Image (tube, grey):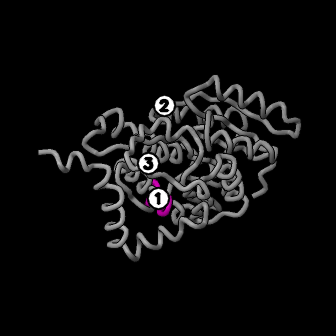
Amino acid sequence: MDVKGKVVIVTGASSGIGEAAARAFAREAAKVVLAARRVDKLQTLADEVNAMGNGAQAFVVQADLSKLEDIQSLVMQTLEKYGRIDVLVNNAGFGRLDWLENLDPIKDIQAQIDVNVMGVIQTTRQVLPVMMKQRAGSIINMCSMAGLVGTPTYTIYAASKHAVHGFSEALRREVKPWGIDVSLIYPGGVKTEFSAHAGIKRKTNAKTPDFMMLTADEVGSAVVKLVRHPRGMLVIPWLWNVTVFMNKFLPGLVDYTTINRFTIPEREDELNAK
C-alpha cells in the first residue's frame, strides 16, 4: 500500500508509540486521525503534522477506547471528514504490573481487559465494514512480547495481549479475501511512559538490557513498514525470537530460570514469613 494520501486512524496517539507512529505516517503525507483521551496532547501533535507542508493532514478525535460510544463516534467522524478508512492502528493500551493478588479488580484487571482487548475488538469491528466495502485496508494491532511469553507480574497484561494475538490471527484469515491485511507487531522493551504508569516495583532491578531497548520512533517506523509490506507477525528487535523459540520448545527451562532468578528472589520475604 502506498501510504501517501491514505486515511489512517491511530489510537493512543497522545504519547509513546502511537504518537511516533502518527508522525511516521505524517512524514509519508498521510491523513492521520489522532485518537486518545488527552485532547490537548493530540492537538499539539496535530498542529505539528499540519505544519509539515508535505500534504499531511491531522484530525483530532477525543476518544476513550473502553467506551463503545466513543469508538463509534471516532469512526463516524473519520468517515464524515474523509469518506474512507485505509489503515487502522490499534495502539491504545496500558499495563498494571504486580502480583495478581495485589491488582485492583476494577482499576487494574477490568480496565486492562476493557482497553487492551475490548477496545481493539470493538474498534476493529466498527472499521471492518468500511474496509470490506472498499475491498482494501490494513489493520495493525500493537501486541507485545507479553503476547508470546508470559512472565511474573504480567498476568493480566499478558492475558490481554495473548487475546489480541488470537483475535488477530483469526481475523487475518477471515478478511484477507476482501483485500484486508491484518498484522501483529511484538515490540520488546520500549522507551515510553509505559513503565512510569505500570507501577513496576522490583527488588532484583530486572529489566530489558539497554542494547535490546527500542525507541518509540523505531516502533512507529516499523508500523508504517508493515502497512507497505504486510506480514502476519513482526517481533522487534529480532533477537527476541530466541526467547519465543525457547518458550515454545523448552518451556521447562524457561520456567525454572524465571522462577529461580526472578520470582523467588522477588518474593523471598513473603516466602520466609511465618
Residue furthest to the bottom in view is 249
Q: Residue 186 occupies which quadrant of the picture? A: bottom right
- Location of the C terminus by quadrant is top left
Q: What residue type is labelled 1?
A: His
Q: Which mark is residue 117?
A: none
| Along the viewing direction, whichever of 156 and 36 lies nearer the viewer | 156
Question: What secondary structure prevails in the magenta region?
Answer: helix
Disc 2 versus disc 3: distance between alpha carbons?
41 Å
For disc 1, the marked residue is: 165
For disc 2, the marked residue is: 69
Q: How packed is label 3: few (under 14 Cα within 10 Å), some, or many (20 or more)?
A: few
Residue 74 position in % (x across, y down): 59, 34
Residue furthest to the right in view is 53
Q: Which amino acid does label 3 sit on?
A: Asn
Q: Which of pointers 2 and 1 lies earlier in the amino acid sequence?
A: 2
The reply, left or right, for residue 145 in relation to residue 4 is left
Disc 1 versus disc 3: distance between alpha carbons?
29 Å
Disc 2 is placed on an element classified as: helix
Residue furthest to the top in view is 40
Residue 94 position in % (x across, y down): 47, 40
Q: Which of pointers 2 and 3 lies earlier in the amino acid sequence?
A: 2
Residue sitting at 64 percent across and 22 percent down? 40
For disc 3, the marked residue is: 205
Q: Residue 247 occupies which quadrant of the picture? A: bottom left
Using the rendered image of the protein, determine whether residue 132 is visible from the camera's viewpoint: no
Residue sitting at 50 percent across and 41 percent down? 195
Residue 57 position in % (x across, y down): 78, 35
Please provide the residue range marked out in magenta: 164-170
Q: Which of pointers 1 and 3 lies earlier in the amino acid sequence?
A: 1
The reply, left or right, for residue 200 in relation to residue 177 is left
